Image (cartoon, rainbow, N blue to C red):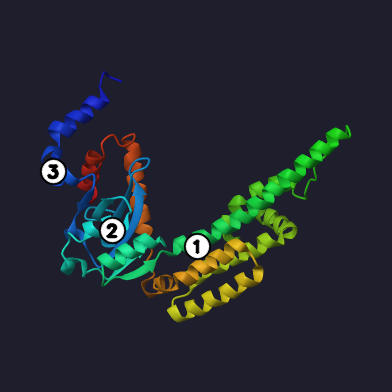
Amino acid sequence: MYGVNGKLLQNQYKDFLSDYSTWNQKSHAKDWLLYPQNIGENLSIDETALSYDELYTIITNKKDKGKAGSIVAIIQGTKTDTVIEIFNKIPLKTRNKVQEITLDMAPNMELIVKKSFPNATLVTDRFHVQKLAVEALQEIRIKHRWEAIDTENEAIEKAKYHKKKFNPEILENGETKKQLLARSRYLLYKRENKWTDNQKERAKILFDIYPDLKTAYQLTTELSNIFHQTTNKIYAFTKLAKWHEKVNQAGFKSFNTISRTIINHYKTILNYFDNRSTNASAESFNAKIKAFRSKFRGVRSIEFFLFRLTNLYA
């Protein structure tokens, strides 16, 4: 449009108008970037993809809330030894200032934090714990949906064989079981007090036909309530133990896996209740990277992309 060559314009900016050519981190930008001056007491660590298969470990300072001064480090890959080696370029005295770091439950991230920031308390992001429960709940719904599809297919084939018209079972809200299970996806993500009238009706039918889904929904809600409503670490420990017992009684394999995961990470999960810290700032920063990448239609040059990103957020 208007005869402007976008690629040429970008190259002009890159080579002549910007400070990219004299950028002091350009030589190693693709491998690592460090901004030790941005280290604060509370950090977040996470991984994100800058392009399709290019994973990077990113540490941000929560204090700056995704604005200028947020980026502490961007390191290519998630390999423990490599990331630790790069962090060791920052003086230990500076790294010892960090009091708390939020992270997911990836063992490599946990080891990186322990080795690189010895004074920091590790806090498992509660949203990752809750997400596991939501995924387990949806897994049960999806299993029932496939069963409903198989049952319907068998009924259709049987009707054809006997040269009869297939008449699906219609539930009281006008849906088939297959439709009920497909359309219940979003209500299972929501709290009961947020349901619309249609969702309330659908949920009643769903839970009457599939009581295991009702139990799984209750377990998911109870786990969420522990994080939302509990302020004391000791009380939280007791409530998580009771939740564990309910999971054992329910007998859901996926929820038992979550319970074991919580047991294996209980110390860092319970640390959440000290300051109620989450990895929301890291997730928000990842979203900004994706938006930034989308705006410029992908990443042609990792180094130049990082130059522009750090100009805004480092």
In front: 13, or 55? 55
Please identify the quadrant where the N terminus is shown. top left
Q: Which residue is mark 1?
A: 130
Q: Amino acid at mark 3?
A: Trp
Q: Which residue is mark 2?
A: 81
In front: 120, or 292? 120
Residue at 25 percent of width and 22 percent of height: 5
Q: Amino acid at mark 2?
A: Asp
Secondary structure of the residue carrying numbered label 1: helix
- In the visual, does 296 lie left or right of 235? left
Q: Amino acid at mark 1?
A: Gln
Cα distance in 3D space between marks 3 and 2: 27 Å
Residue 93: x %, y % from top left: 16, 69
Residue at 32 percent of width and 59 percent of height: 45
Cα distance in 3D space between marks 1 and 3: 42 Å
Query: Given the current orientation, which residue lies at the most extreme left position?
Result: 22
Q: Which residue is mark 3?
A: 23
Secondary structure of the residue carrying numbered label 2: helix
Residue at 45 percent of width and 60 percent of height: 128
User: Can you tell which of label 1 and label 2 is closer to the viewer?
Assistant: 2
Q: Image quadrant of residue 113?
A: bottom left
Tell which circle, 3 or 2, labels the residue nearer the N-terminal end. 3
Dot 2 alpha-carbon crowd within 10 angstroms: few under 14, some 14 to 19, many 20 or more: few
